[in-house]
Image: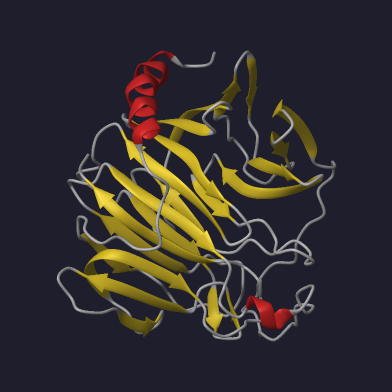
Amino acid sequence: MFRSARLLRLAAPLAATLALAAPAAATSVEGLAVTIENRTTPALCIGRDNVALTLSSPQTRRFALTAAHPSYLPMLGAADAPAADLIACDGAPAAETPAQAPSRTTLYEDLSVQLVGTRRPGLFSGNAVPVRVGDREAAGVDTLELWAIRDGRAERVVVIEPASGVWRLRPLAPEGRGATAFGAGVVVGPIEGETPRTAIESIVFAPRTQTFQLAFVGGGGAAIRLATLDRERIALEVVFDRPVADRPFAAVRGDFVTRFAADLAEIAVREADAPGWREAPITAFESATATDLWAGRTTPSRHATSAPDLVLDRFEPL
């Protein structure tokens, strides 16, 4: 049975707050400084999600998450170059072909947006997070895909993994170019595990405000609204019903093997009261107390070459 009573109690105040929120900007002039820690480990293979940046603050109840095309995108032409097998993997098992084809369920559709639930047999076994849109409900979807319909063209712009709480974003493709790649993801909610994840109890999507209402297994919830979407960036506004006081409230997950095989290779932080940004390779960064976090690449990689950079900022107590 869909456990929605607690979620519905959370939804009204969170939705009211989001309705007053301004769209996310590039960086925050003022804001809370949060603790950023790098838990990245070495890897020889893409697909290990070995990049892990956690964000902690006992005060933060709102922040902005933005994905923007990398600065080098105009150099790539109309499409990415084919990925090259450049890395000697350390005994990675061969991918198995699923016995059944993926199934898709359209949970909502109008002239500008479509929400689709996808099940891939064996991908996230045991996942039973219920998802509801109006009177439509689905459980056990492996991914939720939000498609934006613009100028007669549909593009996936948000992919959510309910079992892990990972959000992957990409802006609309530039005019005259094919769809860009998805890259690193962001986990939103109380973080647990060596590979950061969060436990979601249920998800409700409100099409009118384009807001996802999350209830977490351990208590509390969050409203995540699509605030900005264009051919440069996509931005989400995140509001927690209460701060996540005893663990990180968000984490960035991605892949780094080398600079030429990574969806995140560099990091920049604007530390509290600092006159400028501090930049470092992802392998050299340790920690910071900062009001702004940028994670991405300044030179192309052979992996997910066109995937966007990520910015997390505008941390506020509400």
Q: Nearer the viewer, residue 227 or 61?
A: 227
Out of 83 and 39, give the one closest to the viewer.
83
Q: Residue 293, position in %: x, y?
A: 35, 66
Quadrant in which the C terminus appears: top left
Display coloring: secondary structure
Quarter assignment of residue 148: top right
- Indicate the position of residue 300 as horizontal and vertical percent values: 62, 83
The quarter of the picture where residue 7 lies is top left
Residue at (75%, 30%) from the top-left corner?
105
Residue placed most toward the observer, 249 or 78: 78
Residue 304 horizontal/vertical position (percent): 66, 71
- Residue at 78% x, 47% y is 151
Image position of 295 with respect to 302: above or below:
above
**Left/right of residue 19 with respect to residue 122 in the rendered view:** left
Would you place residue 280 above or below residue 205 in this image?
below
Of residues 274 and 268, the one nearer the viewer is 274
Q: Is residue 6 left or right of residue 76?
A: left
Residue drawn at the location 54% of the way across and 33% of the way down: 210
Residue at the outermost left position = 273
With respect to residue 59, does 75 lie above or below? below
Q: Quadrant of residue 130?
A: top right
Q: Is residue 133 above or below residue 245?
A: above
Spot occupied by residue 109 in the image (x, y as percentages of width and height): 72, 28
Looking at the image, residue 32 sits to the left or right of residue 189; the answer is left
Residue appearing at x 33%, y 60% in the figure: 54
Count how many numbered circles sit on residues in the image.
0
Residue 192 in sight in this render: no
Quadrant placement of the N terminus: top right
Is residue 57 visible to us here?
yes
